[in-house]
Structures are given as structure tokens and as C-alpha cells.
Image: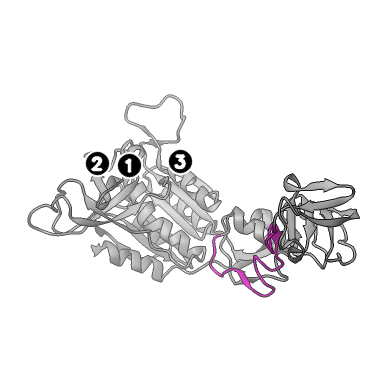
Amino acid sequence: MIPAAKALRLILARTRPMPSMLVRLPEADGRITIRDVRAPFALPRFTASSMDGYALSSRATKGATRARPVRLRLRQRAIFAGSNPGPRVAPDAAVRIMTGAPLPTGVDAVLPQEEARLEGGALLVTRPVRAGRNVRRAAEDCRRGDVVVPKGTRLQPGAIALLSILGLRRVEVRRAPRVAIVVTGSEVRPPGARALPDYAVHDASAAFLTSALKEWLIAPSCVIYVRDRDAEIRAALTRALARADLVIVTGGVSVGERDLVRPALASLGARTIFWGVAQKPGKPLYFGERRGVKVLGLPGNPASTVVCYCEYVRPALRAMLGEPRSAPEAWTARLAAPVARIESKTQFLRGRMEESERGWQVSVDRRQGSNLLRSFLGNDCLVVVPPGSGPPLAAGSRVRVHPLPWRRA
């Protein structure tokens, strides 16, 4: 067996980003940019009003008071968004302007219409107006040539809106990896299977993985259920390897008589990078590859599947998508209660974080069985307990914590 940290290093060292592709902006959500995106022009493109009111020169309003207002003649033609601002405005004049309309030359501020006082075709200003008030300056957001979306950015709605307002229709991103799921086990049935025998169980692994992959807008290229029979497993793996960049197998990777996945992969020419990790849960984790296709074999117990996905599969996906930081996000927290260590294994324990006066505190759940899924509902992190002999880690000890991907802040 190898240490958990080395297992992750080996996976990331052998996982390469997917090729690039051009996609339309509506299809780019969640994808990773492959190069810096620069602004083709400044934003805003022109200086404009940020509200309905009256555009004027701030210098003309100096000394204005309620008792002695400054009187500015009104230009007849108002300026609307999308219209030409017209000629220069004289220092002793003002012009009606609407939100988003371009400012004409000669003015540098906008008096809101609710503060305006009109009299006999003129605007009366009863106090000085600061230069730049209610004005959106040209190039205030970015200048032409600025990097607005750096390489390696995961595109979210805000970034897509920015690219759209810059007039871009397509963006170069990493192609999403094709992911195949193979669920092994003669006792396993798809969810909703009718007439479930007493010795059978409904599968949770494929449902979890399919849901988790939606984070990357990935739908499995195939989901295959297969019994613990050598020929059937080889056929399922052959099909999966032909349709994927990453194959995730659940079950069949341990040392039992019917754990047939590793021999089947070997017979198909797959190379084993490692098998067996000094961790709990998920000790029989497998990682191999065949003709560039990566294979991650996860234990069949559902909680082990979830833990191994968070600690290994998700980082591999992030690396394939080109994210600069692929390893799990790590926080530091203090233990709320003592936690026992295991001499030769790293533990990934379900826990819950809470803020306290001393910073983040984490409580470890008592339910840690590899077959127990309910504990993932009430907890929001995995507590990383390093191997060690001797007494338990004391309450207040600092530990590394990996927030679950679906944790809500």
C-alpha cells in the first residue's frame, strides 16, 4: 500500500488536461479557459449617465445655494440611451438625459431628476454638483487589451456576461472529459428495479457519481451494471474504455474471490499505476491506464465511493479540465473532541465545521461505517486524520479539513 498523499500525487502527475475547443458562450458555463481573454475594446465604451436627470457642467454650479440658485438654460432635445449625444453643451446650459445615454462634450455630471427644479424653460441648481456625479466613465471597468478572464478560469455566469458584453460569441476552453461508469456486483440492482430479491441491494454509486459529475456539466457516456463474472466484466470494461477518457469502476477491486476487475483490466492491456492505499475508508483504491484512458477503481461500499470521489476522482477531473489547482481544497480547524488515530492509515472522517471565537472548529461524526450514507447529509467536510500511534488527537488539536464539494458556505 502507498500513502494517501502519494496516491493523489501519482494520479495528478499522470493526468493531462483535455484538448481545447471553441464553444459558443451559452455552452461555456463551467468550462475552463485555455488562454487569457483580452478586452477587444474598453468598458464602458463611452461615458454615460447612470440615471435619469440633467447633464451639466459641475463648474457652472459652484456657489449655488437655495437662496441664490444657478440658472441653466435647457437644451430642447433630450438624450436617450442608444442615441447620438448631439453637439457640445454650453457652460451655461444643461440637457435632459436618460440612464445609459452618452454624455455630450461640455458636461461632467448628472443632476438626478428628483432633485431638479424647473422654471420657465431653465434648470435651477440650488447647491453645487460634484464632477463625476452619476456618471459612468469610459474604460472604468477595463481598458482595451486588458486581461479580463485569465487562463485557467472556470467560467461562471458573471464571466460569461462579461464576455458577452465584449461582443465575443465563442471562447476557447478545455473539452470536457468523457466519463464512463461501471458498477460491479452480482447483488447490485439499478435504483427502482422491481422485485428486489432479499439478497440484492439498490445501487447508490452510479446515482452519486452521475449527480456529482453535473458540477462539471458532464453526463456519463455510459453507465454499465455488470455481475461478478469474468467475461461480463471484460466486456463491460472493453465498452467503457472505448467510450471514455476516464473510467470509474465501483466494486470488484479488493482481494475477494470475485473481485475480478484488476485481472480483467490486466487482460485488456491496462497498466496498474497503484493498487491499495493506506487509508480508511477506501483502502483497495485502484489507478491504472490503457492507451491514454485513465481508470479509477473505487471500493463498492457507497460511503467509500463518496470519499474516494472527493479525494481522488474530483481532483483528476479538475486536472483534465485544466484547473490550475487540482488538489482538494484544504482548511484548518480545531477538533471539538478527541479523535483516535490508526498507526498505518490516513483517515477521512465525516465531520461538521462551525465557527467559534477561536476560529473554525470541527466535530467528527460517530457514524463512519463505509456502508453508511446518511452521515453525508448532516456533515459538510472530511476531516483528515494522519496516521500515528499513541494517544488520540486531543480536543483543540489542529487538523486539515476538506470541505465537501456540495457544502454550502
Q: Nearer the viewer, residue 196 or 364?
A: 364
Residue 197 locus on image (x, y percent): 36, 27
Mark-to-mark CA distance, 2 and 1: 8 Å
Mark before the other along the chain sequence, 2 or 3: 3
Which mark is on residue 365?
2
Is residue 308 rendered magenta in the image? no
Q: Residue furthest left?
A: 390
Amino acid of disc 3:
Ala
Is residue 130 rendered magenta in the image? yes
Residue denoted by label 1: 379
Residue 85 locus on image (x, y percent): 86, 61
User: Can residue 360 be seen by looking at this rendering?
Assistant: yes
Name the main secondary structure of what is drawn in magenta. Answer: loop
Is residue 38 placed above or below 297 in the rendered structure?
below
For this view, does 81 lie left or right of residue 2?
right
Mark before the other along the chain sequence, 3 or 1: 3
Residue at left offset 81%, top offset 67%: 106
Amino acid of disc 2:
Asp
Label 1's element? Answer: loop
Q: Quadrant of residue 38?
A: bottom right
| Magenta span | 128-154
Q: Are marks 2 and 1 in contact (CB under 8 Å)?
A: yes
Residue denoted by label 3: 207
